[in-house]
Image (cartoon, rainbow, N blue to C red):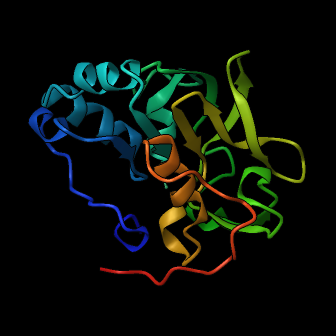
Amino acid sequence: MLRSVGVTATEVRLPKHLEELDGLIIPGGESTTLSRLMSLYELREPVAEMAKRGKAVWGTCAGMIMLANEITEEDPVPMALMDVGVQRNAFGRQVDSFEQDLHIKALGEREYHAIFIRAPVIIRIGDPVDVLAALPDGRPVAVQQGNMMATSFHPELTADARIHRYFVSLAGGPAFDPEAPLIDTPRVR
Ligand code: GLN
């Protein structure tokens, strides 16, 4: 998705891979595994440093859990970079995964089709946090705190790259224009 919006994208597995990046996406997966591997490969401190230096950081799904400063369980150990409280597996098991059209004002008028896979939800937001999108019942599922963003859903599973373009603008790329023609960008692999 990043490549499809004209960004040079690279995988991060070790602290040295963070050097010279303008932004970082902590992806979905399993947050307990992310937590263990981030400790093992000593990624916690350099990622926190990167966020504190103002680089763009976006946690999606399990990545959102890692950014939270409070979660409802003891495992994983989150990085406490965003002032949000998060509940893991808030919608139930894998079979309870679902899709939902969201209104995300920052992305323009057209609804955003969001895919939730054994997703977490935000149960508390602090003052510095802006809600970008909420479910019809009002529960926030996309938030921003300055240079950091967190989403409950998986943004890489549709062809709609608006949210990636929005993130790229936080990372110093071209300004996101919600009025720009809404053209889906094809996926590249
Ligand atoms: N259920 C996972 C967790 O709690 C997150 C799922 C996902 O990233 N799709 O870590």
Coordinates of residue 189 in the picture (x, y in percent): 29, 80
Side of 120 relative to 14 (left or right): right
Residue 74 can be seen in this image: yes
Residue 154 can be seen in this image: no
Coordinates of residue 171 in the picture (x, y in percent): 43, 42
Q: Splitting the image into 4 quarters, where does residue 8 fall? A: bottom left
Coordinates of residue 22 in the picture (x, y in percent): 32, 41
Residue at x-position 77% and y-position 61%: 108
**Where 38 falls versus 139 (above or below)?**
above
Q: Quadrant of the N terminus?
A: bottom left
Side of 78 relative to 97 (left or right): left
Coordinates of residue 131 in the picture (x, y in percent): 75, 36
Number of marks:
0
108 or 137: nearer the viewer? 108
Side of 91 relative to 103 (left or right): left
**Where 172 falls versus 110 (above or below)?**
above
Q: Splitting the image into 4 quarters, where does residue 52 fall? A: top left
Residue at x-position 47% and y-position 18%: 80
88 or 11: nearer the viewer? 11
**Where 109 falls versus 173 (above or below)?**
below
Residue at x-position 36% and y-position 20%: 53
Residue at x-position 31% and y-position 25%: 50
For the view shown, which residue lies furthest in the right direction?
137
